[in-house]
Image (cartoon, grey):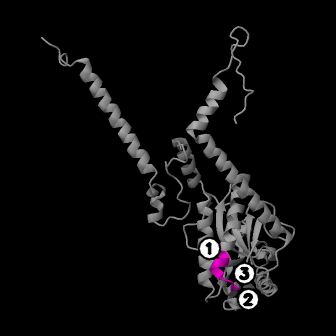
Amino acid sequence: MERPGAGINSNECENTSTKRKMSEEFEASTVDCLINMPFATIDIKDDYEITDVPPKISKRSVGNEQITNDQIKKRKKRHKDYQPNYFLSIPITDKEITGEIKILQNAIIQQDKRLTKAMVSDGSFHITLLVMQLLNEDEVNIGIDALLELKPLIEEILQGKHLTLPFQGIDTFGNQVGFVKLAEGDHINPLLEIAETAKKTFQEKGILAGESRSFKPHLTFMKLSKAPWLRKNGVKKIDPELYEKFISHRFGEETFSRIDLCSMLKKKQSDGYYHCESSIVIGKKPIGIQDLINEALHRERMCLKAKVKQIKELLLKPETQAKIRRELFEGRLIDNSNQANHVDFSATLT
């Protein structure tokens, strides 16, 4: 009795093997084609408006280097562990505003001296434009680059006009954080556009930036979390009666002129303001020496990045790699008796 398949000759086996190989090569070619299509970089998060982290996770090949599963897992874990440690600050320095806030703070302290430690120092007054996570010096440098790239985009939004920010009234976040409100007016829309542009600029650099909640500009003057022991002493919320006299008070106006990249964790400056990595000046204010230094460093970084990119592209070319292999491993005389493991690397790639 003849065994099943015994009649299949070797040619038919080879044909079957060849067809399978062609099918696999076609499938691989199709996948490579799809990966390089424009929609390959679109993340599902965009459709659901999840803005905590930039849409940068994909298996898209960069150059000829494929992102591994381990790298994707690390990125996903980092997104899960997203804890902002840097932020973009619009400093509030107008003396009328800072003076009026000090009056407000003193009025509250007079009613409850325990709240002294919950007050924000006048050197720290600011509007938080964007929060982000920068884990090392390289990422801080990328953040500085993004900030410098933001300057012309903001000036395009403002089109030469001054942006005045008026502050009026008091509110809280869950009776835990007290803040002075930004008054309603025509200044709101350009400020929101600046915040959105900042988020997009930093996210396009691969920086984890932004929050799921919408941007609500505010000027914090006190927060209970600054003094955790208050809860143990019966102070669990900010009593509205403490600031009722200021509920509609006008605090003054700040002319928007600067954005700082600040650290939440590094030691504050001697004036009470946050540690500042870099700044941009908006509008027609005179450019100081630090701004000139920042611009020079930015240009230098851009030049170096361009050179690194060119070198990388050159090394990824098949003809370059073939030439390197020839230079290293071909035409070398190796003395097997005395230099079994020695290869001459003296020749250079030209």
- Say which label, 1 or 3, has the lower sequence index: 1
State the image coordinates of residue 16 (x, y, percent, origin top left).
Answer: 27, 27
Tell us which disc is closer to us: 2 or 3: 3
**Amino acid type, mark 1:** Ala
**At 71% from the left edge and 18% from the top edge, which residue is drawn?**
342
Residue 337 vs 132, above or below: the answer is above
Left or right of 217 on screen, residue 22: left
Identify the disc placed on residue 195: 1
Instruction: Rate crowding at label 1 as few (under 14), some (14 to 19) or many (20 or more) other CA atoms within 10 Å.
Output: many
**Amino acid type, mark 2:** Phe
State the image coordinates of residue 335 (x, y, percent, origin top left).
Answer: 70, 12
User: So how many labels did they put on this image?
Assistant: 3
Left or right of 297 on screen, residue 12: left
Q: Is residue 155 magenta?
A: yes
Q: Residue 39's image quarter?
A: bottom left
Residue 147 vs 57, above or below: the answer is below
Quarter the N terminus occupies: top left
Residue 208 vs 175, above or below: the answer is above
Residue 80 vs 158, above or below: the answer is above
**Amino acid type, mark 3:** Phe
**At 66% from the left edge and 28% from the top edge, which residue is drawn?**
327
